[in-house]
Amino acid sequence: MKVQRRIAVPLVRLFLSAAIGGVMATAGVVIAQAPQAQTSVTLVAKEDADVFRIQLETPVGALSQVTLLQGARPSLRMELKGVSMSEAQALAQQMGRPAHVRQLAVLPGLDGRIVIDVQLSTAMRVLDETVVALDGGRSRWEVVLADGAEPASSPAASVPAALGDIRFGGSEDRLDMTLEGSAGLVAEVSFEDAPGRLVLELPGVSRSQVEEVVARMDRLPPYFRKVLVPASGPVRIVFDLRGPLDLVDTGGVAQGRAGQVTLSLVPDQAPGKSQRDGLQSIQTAVVNGELTLQLGGAAQARVNAFTLEQPSRLVLDFLGWTPDQVRQAVSKFKSAHPAVRQAAMTETRMGSARVVFDLVSSVDLGGRQYQASDAQGQMSLALRAVRPELASRGQQGLAVALGRDMGDLRKPGVVIRPVQLEGRHAQALETTPAPAARYNLLGMLEKAMTTDSRYLASKADFEAVSEAIPQAQAGFLPVASFDYQRSNVHQNVRETPNPTFLKNSVSYPSQSMSLTITQPLIRAQSWVRMDQAKVSVEQARLNLLAAEQDLILRVTTGYLNLLATQDGMELAKAEREATSKQLELARGRLQSGLGTITQMHDTTARYAVTETKVIESANRVDDARLALKEITGEDVEIGAGFKRDFLAVAPKPANPDSWVAAAIEQNLSLQSRKLARDIAELEIKRQSAGHLPTLDLVGSMSRQDADGSIYGGGQKTDTGELAFKLKVPLYEGGLTSSLVREAVARSSKADREMDQESRKTERIARSTFMAVQANVQMLDALRQSMVAQESALEAKLEGHRSGLQTVVAVVDAYRLYFAARRDYLQARYDYLSNRLKLKQAVGTLTRQDLQDLATLLD
């Protein structure tokens, strides 16, 4: 059996792919709690001067998928289910033949579906798309098209296929495989059940690239036994599987010339012949403030649970069970909580039963509990962090016309000129950014140890100061020198009363050589300098350790800051999306006469604030990335964040005086200041030793060779000398006394600096201790505040649906809810950062602390 699927970085716009009007649309599924709606379908096409509108009104769930195809024959394909061929053909006649339509065809699709293929006369792009829920279980979908292909489609088409890396991730029982490479990357996925294999075929990618990527895989997920790249045939990556898998989700993203393809895989199993009755019931309930999904009769089942996004879904695979064993429970399911809307039943690739729950927003799966209250028992699955910001999408009454144009609102009357760059740099440079390197926390520290300028400067300073010991030792060792001189001598006797010297002139060469060895015997300054050198090297070692601690703290702080800014950007986008929906609702209420212009203006202003928050959060993310680039010297990417929430604990012992005492004794910066004071005191002794005499043992050997003289003949002379040289300084113009006074002043300065460092160390130790304790209490309070704001938001939404609350009140509730979430997430990062600062204050911060922190992160 071979199942194949092609996944590529998207070059055309694909929209409305999975959910319409809040109901899951999956091939071959049974929709639970589906309203009894009309069966008629209407299709309307409208042409304006520059745009082409297509409006389709169907029962909820009838419209399965819409795809805009580009290329030589552009077309808009609408896939319908539950619609007969004759009814679809009637729709085609009803639509007519607008100028933008070249041809209209009705085609049979898979699983009894009908495809309406609207072939366009020219390439078009999507300007807008809306979906609204109508009364009576119906939904209206409308798309607005304009001439011209999607601008994002052309660059990727010209990029050659390339593979740079394969990463594994995921959550719950789902494995995500991400292929990173160029925008032209395409992956063709197939399964071979005999033997069990997953095959990724990569058209256009070189075999050497694939082999290099596979060679870097040091650890495979437990689903895979081994991986290999066949030496012949198409370029493929073959994973030997430990058991059957199913491909449940795919996606592609292109940014410029870079792109990535993501595959989501889950365990699978063929259904067996079981005597079990199957799933008895599905219920939603709130237990201890936590939303749970209760599955009656599933205690003995092998349930694989995972979530999918865009749209948000919870999927339960009952591995080994047939679809008939769960069908009745799905058909009876009615959600008692607004976060879970619908349930749909389908099956896995191997044929096991699969149940898909349509969710309002993303959830985190908690633990599972089993109760053996009957023969089958019950399994409860916790759903955590359910966000209600999208709950208003499913409410009735959203099918209202857009409000009036906002052009009547006041606009600024004066426009300030933008900041403009002058000179040769004003022209934009066309550069291709280098791909960002991906690091975990420990990997980033290892990289920083080799690239951070501040740490490398401290390392070089340690190496330089270490030379002070051999330099001081040189003051005790002999000093040898060799001198050589060669000259031509010219003598002319002009007048002399001595008859021995005749009046004449003579010229002759002369040369001399001497070897002098001096052994210091008594030099007080050299003794003190040796002590100083040892203390200086110890101080440099402490400074290097302090620099390493500082690097650990800077890397961790930068890493956590980037995670915090990324969380802030995601929250800002979510707040903007929620406020956007409320703005649309405010416009609709104004148009229908149910709202006021003041409410719409207030909502518009609040939406504008969320737009600025998104921009500010994006700027903070860029700044946080640049802060890490300042350390590592390159653009970096990091993991997704925390695997799970954690429980903050207070430092032990709980007495701040104990931590202060440890800091006074162990803080590296304070110890360095103490050694600086010792060096200054030794400097006083060294300069004072300038008043003491010195004694050296001097030995010399010399030879002088002259080839002539005024006497008419030359001579050769050898001389040897051994002497004690005593030097007693008497007066040097007051230089030594001045140097002593300078050393005393510098020693006093070192004392004051040590006192200041001691007070600073005490303050930092006490304040960071109190900060960690406050963070622990604050995290608990903020967690409760977030839960309270979530409840308040649900109450505001319920009050708005019943007409008791205004749109502005709902928007403010959203703002308070997201502010509470933002404060809580930031407090988690502050707690972890302050823990490391406290350990740095007491001088015990090591790489092991990063290892402990890394276990919390993806």
Image: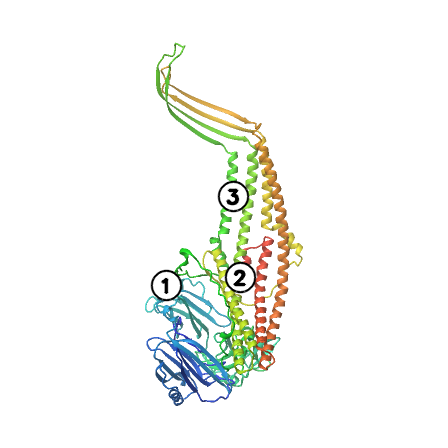
Viewed as shown, does residue 34 lie left or right of 372?
Answer: left
Q: In which quarter of the view is residue 487 placed?
A: top left
Q: Which of marks 2 and 1 is nearer the N terminus?
A: 1
Whole-angstrom CA distance, mark 3 to mark 2, is 35 Å
664 or 588, nearer to the observer: 588
Q: What residue type is labelled 2?
A: Asn
Q: Which of marks 3 and 1 is in front?
A: 3
Instruction: Give the x, y percent position of residue 545.
Output: 54, 50
Whole-angstrom CA distance, mark 2 to mark 1, is 34 Å
Q: Are marks 2 and 1 in contact (CB under 8 Å)?
A: no
Q: Earlier in the sequence, mark 3 or mark 1?
A: 1
Q: Nearer the viewer, mark 2 or mark 1?
A: 2
Name of the residue lying farthest toward the front? 413
User: The residue tagged with tag 2: helix, strand or loop?
Assistant: helix
Q: Residue 209 carries which label?
A: 1
Q: Nearer the viewer, mark 3 or mark 2?
A: 2
Q: What residue type is labelled 1?
A: Gln
Residue 459, compared with residue 242, is above or below; it is: above
* Residue occupied by mark 3: 465
